[in-house]
Amino acid sequence: MNFVMPTYARLEVAFTRGEGVWLWDTEGKRYLDAVSGIAVCNLGHAHPALARVLCAQAKRLWHTSNLYRIEPQEALAFELARLAGMDKAFFCNSGAEANEAALKIARAYGHAKGIAEPKIVVCAGSFHGRTLATLSATGNPKVQQGFAPLVSGFVRVPYDDPGAVAALAQDRDIVAVLVEPIQGEGGVRIPAPGYLRQLRALCDRHGWLLMLDEVQTGIGRTGAWFACQHEGIVPDVMTLAKALGNGFPIGACLARGEAAEVLQPGMHGSTFGGNFLACAVALEVLRTIARDHLLARAAALGARLLAEFGRRLSDCPQVRAVRGCGLMLGIELDRPCAALVSAALARGLLINVTAGNVVRLLPPLILEDEQAEFLAETLAALIQEWPS
């Protein structure tokens, strides 16, 4: 009998160890991990620098709570604020918690302006988490099913449609716009150039907070520290998690300006958020990405893979589109393709399918040329063989 709640449709494989981009299962078979624990392990598995830092910190101190100063947390907040152009950080344990903090900032910001029932603009096809508030903000009825009544206060618009946001200008209860720079769970949907700049301008014009969910796109995934930097804009609130700890649970909600001053003592908190272990690891993640020049690597290798898949799949009638930004790539098919995950597993490759018909690739930023060639060759062959 399995005593784990069946909240996941798990594959029948269990891994026992990892090294770099590789994982080994209980039978000793090796797999190239092109999922990275869902955009988490940007530095691959069992990275020696992270292991050293984690072990050293574990021998000193694990947890004291946020009743006291935590120097690694203060150092991490400084680094993230410097990299993102933000002012302050709140630390938690996951992306959903980071987005919860952002939603509370938006509501408190609205109440401070005398708005009794603040509204937040969110997008169709989005994914912001599975707590009740983030589930309500998410633009996917399937994941909301069975959890009504949902949290109110969200106004939904189409993604990549700044005109739909502009049309809400007369609604005096709107206080913020929450959007993903690239929709990951929604199918690696990349908006048209200028989308974020237009949202920034709209928020500036109407006094709204621009809140970016960079949980999946942040920490180098797209070839920049944060995806919004491709458009040269800075949000008022930014949420992070996933790759920040390379597998050690940590999330962060960054804010600047007025938004950074909203939460005061007693308004929000987290028992484990930003503890010594998590912050020590996250600091080393940032140092390693910078030291090893992995932002440029992700940008260059992502462009190469995008071109390679475009070339290999150009004659496949079942392929609708190949798109990507850095090492966040999607191959959209004209039919459901979830079974490709098991087919790839049999050939020693870990992939993911999202939105039903989009193969999503999120390989570690440390992927080498030869490994990228294996990924492209193996996956392209599988898609070409896929039943028409």
Image: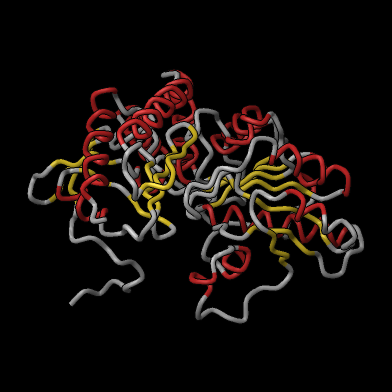
Quadrant into which the N terminus falls: bottom left
- Determine the residue positioned at 26% across, 41% down: 379
Residue 271 at least partly seen: yes
Residue 115 is situated, as x and y percent measured from the top left of the image, at 88, 64
- Determine the residue positioned at 36% across, 70% down: 7
Quadrant into which the C terminus falls: bottom left
For the image shown, how many numbered marks are present on the structure? 0
Report the side of 31 relative to 221 (left or right): left
Residue 165 is situated, as x and y percent measured from the top left of the image, at 77, 54
Quadrant for residue 232, please give it.
Answer: top right
Residue 159 is situated, as x and y percent measured from the top left of the image, at 64, 53
- Determine the residue positioned at 23% across, 39% down: 32
Report the side of 271 relative to 106 (left or right): left
Report the side of 141 relative to 121 (left or right): left
- Determine the residue positioned at 63% across, 57% down: 269
Q: Is residue 216 above or below residue 286?
A: below
Residue 329 is situated, as x and y percent measured from the top left of the image, at 42, 40
